[in-house]
Amino acid sequence: MKYITLHGHFYQPPRENAWLEEIEIQESARPFHDWNARITEECYGPNAVSRILNDEGRIVDITNNYARMSFNFGPTLLTWMEQNKPKIYQAIIAADAASMELYNGHGSAMAQVYNHIIMPLANRRDKVTQVVWGLRDFERRFGRDAEGMWLAETAVDTETLEVLVDNGIKFTVLAPSQAQRYRCIGGEEWLPGVDPRRPYLCRLPSGKHIYLFFYDGERSQAVAFGGLLENGRKFAESLMNGFAPNTDEDQLVHIATDGETYGHHHRNGDMALAYCMQYIKTNGLARLTNYSEYLSLVEVTHEVEIVEDSSWSCAHGIERWRSNCGCHTGGHLDWQQAWRTPLRDALNHLSDRFAEIYEREMYRFHDDPWGLRNEYVRVPLKRSVERAEAFLRAFVPRKLEPREQNRVLALLEMQRQSLYMFTSCGWFFNEISGIEPVQVLQYANRGIQLAKVYFGEDLEEEFLKVLERAPSNLSEYQSGREVYEKRVVPARLDLTQVGMHYAVRSIFTEDPEKQEVLNYVCKSEEFERYNAGSHRLVMGLTKVKSKITLSEAKFSFVILYLGHHHVIGHTFAQLETEEYRLLGESLKPAFDQANLSQVIEKLKEFPGQKPFSFFDMFKDEQIRLLQGILDEQLALASDSYRKINDRNYNLMNVMRASGLEVPDPLRKNLELVLNRDLRDLFADSDRRVSTRKLTTRVNELKKWNIPIDTEEYSYLLGHRLRRLAESIPGRTNRTEAVDNIRKVLNLARPIGINPLLGDVQNIVFHWLKQIRRGEEQEEFNAALIELARHINLDVETILMKRFTARVV
């Protein structure tokens, strides 16, 4: 028998701010907010609804690639996706369930070591936690035990394999270069290397064993870098050429690549993958399978020995993550990576210090500190005060006082940061000031803060002394110490700073007394807000509670908002209720009299104040504030532009009819008006788009030859049409709504607006698969079929497949 498995390793490093546990805006990912959002749009989403095209380029099927391939997702990536892209997340979970039906009860999803550390560089204790956390995460998401586990960068040593087996893992996947030698089980002669077309038994010093698959290196490289994804049929034929001729043995041709290859690194790579799997299945060339099922189908006849301390992405074993071995990501050939060793040394030393504090302090609460750490993964999966409290009740033997709760959770959180410090991406790239090394340094910073605040241990200076030895390639940093001080320390937060951001939000929000600011709950015991034109005076006596450590801080705040980005704020850490009320009584009269300078002077009279301004806010909070201001100002400006246009439109018509050139300011003004009208027409809503208004605007754009931002309007319209399509099942006028989508596309496309229609295609494809006959349905069916053809669906093939399936 010939079998084929295609494995995708889907992973992004954790990018969340270590205090907020939210990803701040990443300029390099534009036009998306951050790289997770961008890659989800380009890869993770498309693979859940991948298109299969006919020879005319029309869609004949939409398929979930994950159900038929083998895959693993990084747990930290799935945590982000569950919160931010729930539909795609659910499609991934559903794909594993579907694969169990396809592959005799063996799911295609593999687990992954939790936050992608290089396992041979970790001590056994950390290895165990990485595996246990990865398995706990997998079980919660997929509702079953994992049979296989993916190792970060496929980095392996014997101890790692022992830990996998101890935790119930049956197999893992490695690169062919990681096999030292192999032989028939029971045979004498060892052969160098490996034949990747069979699974292998690997005997371990403990007397246990694990099964290993070594992927086809040549074809995996061709997929990632050799252009094999340019054509799905070519892809399939290359896989078939991987089988050895003239043999009676069962053979497995399997490849493994970064999952991002299918769509992010190679545009439409998901479609090549979908077509390849469909082509193999339809033509009976081989049987698609996954690793778990294959192990259940064949007898393992050979054994193997691994190359210790090896990986799939470093020719020097695992040196890429601890030395200047020469591996890099290209570009800047004059740069060095001598910073890698000091960075690892600094983090290793810090990790040891964290461990000392953790053991010393946690033994006061639990007789198995490291076993407790293994269970802690349950808490950050979905942050809430209730979840943290439930964990303490379930796993700590005695009832804890509030201060003890804070200390236990701070210890566990310090250990989580300690593990996150070693996320592999921190060493993979070329420069220590890159976003990945800065991210691991941020985790170090958070751990240092917890050690100092809760346990009085100041570890920062000794850490920085080692980091000074890490040379940067950029003159503005010199060393890792400067990177830490300039890029990491400014991001550090405490509870009062979180409260400051709550205070700024309260200027505008409708329900300011209680808000959640990311991982913090803010609640005001007293709150006042006064308006005087565009000026606002906002005051509060507030409590901030961390969902992470359950610690609380009480503070007072006063904000004087002068419009635009002018925020004059003060927080008071130790202001009692009576003092707070006295402050309000002294400020309110001065504000009522518009004596702003007196308000500012009176603020200075109160002790313990800490001033802040717009520039002290999180980047995303700055954007949120500015966007609100801009929306208001743009609306006012738009009204002015429209009045100017209304007063001069007839004059412009006369000039145009007379062959005279319209003055540029009037043309620019008309351009602003028409663009604003388009933006309003395409604004987020599930209502039908007015084709009458759109026709008028399109005619005006053509008449005056007005330029438009086609990329922006394509994005806006695509989102609007998706909302409209999603709302159709609940409408009484479904036919009108379907026709509206088609008519709007007919109007928009001639002026260069070509919205992404993936979501609309998915919805219409689903309807076609469910289409029903009946007199009351015919009008809707006709409109649906017309729209389907309009958005590139091969209606006849789709309906024929549906009819054939019903007959069978």
Image (cartoon, helix red, strand yellow):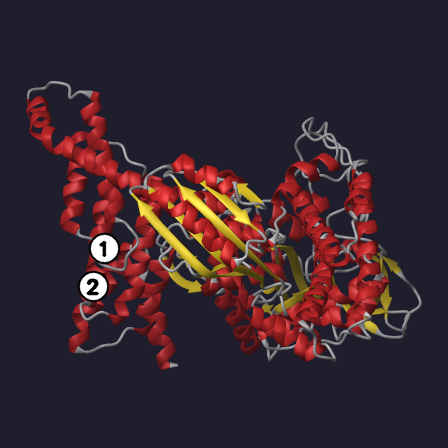
Q: Residue drawn at (69%, 38%), measured in percent from left and top? A: 485
- Residue 158 lies left or right of residue 677; in this view the side is right
Q: Position of residue 370 (x, y in %)?
A: 79, 69
Three-letter residue code for mark 1: Arg
| Labelled disc at residue 727 | none
Q: Vertical placement of 214 versus 565: above or below? A: below
The answer to whether residue 240 shows anywhere in this view is yes
Q: Nearer the viewer, residue 255 or 264?
A: 264
- Residue 214 lies left or right of residue 504; in this view the side is right
Mark 1 vs 2, N-terminal side: 1
Q: CA distance from mark 1 to mark 2?
A: 9 Å
Q: Residue furthest top?
A: 660
* Cβ atoms under marks 1 and 2 closer than 8 Å: yes
| Picture quarter with the C terminus | bottom left
Disc 1 residue crowd, few under 14, some 14–19, many 20+, Cα 10 Å: some
The answer to whether residue 251 shows anywhere in this view is no
Q: Position of residue 738 (x, y in %)?
A: 23, 61
Q: Residue drawn at (76%, 55%), measured in percent from left and top? A: 118
Q: Vertical placement of 573 versus 284: above or below? A: above
Task: Give the residue number, with chain letter if any, for mark 2.
Answer: 783
Three-letter residue code for mark 2: Ala
| Picture quarter with the N terminus | bottom right
Q: Which corner quadrant of the image does residue 793 belong to?
A: bottom left
Q: Residue drawn at (38%, 43%), measured in percent from left and top? A: 627
Q: Which corner quadrant of the image does residue 308 belong to?
A: bottom right
Task: Give the residue number, with chain letter if any, for mark 1.
Answer: 742
Q: Nearer the viewer, residue 596 or 10?
A: 596
Q: Residue drawn at (70%, 79%), measured in percent from left and top? A: 399
Q: Nearer the viewer, residue 530 or 310?
A: 530
Q: Vertical placement of 90 versus 606: above or below? A: below
- Residue 120 lies left or right of residue 241; in this view the side is right
In what element is the residue under mark 1?
helix
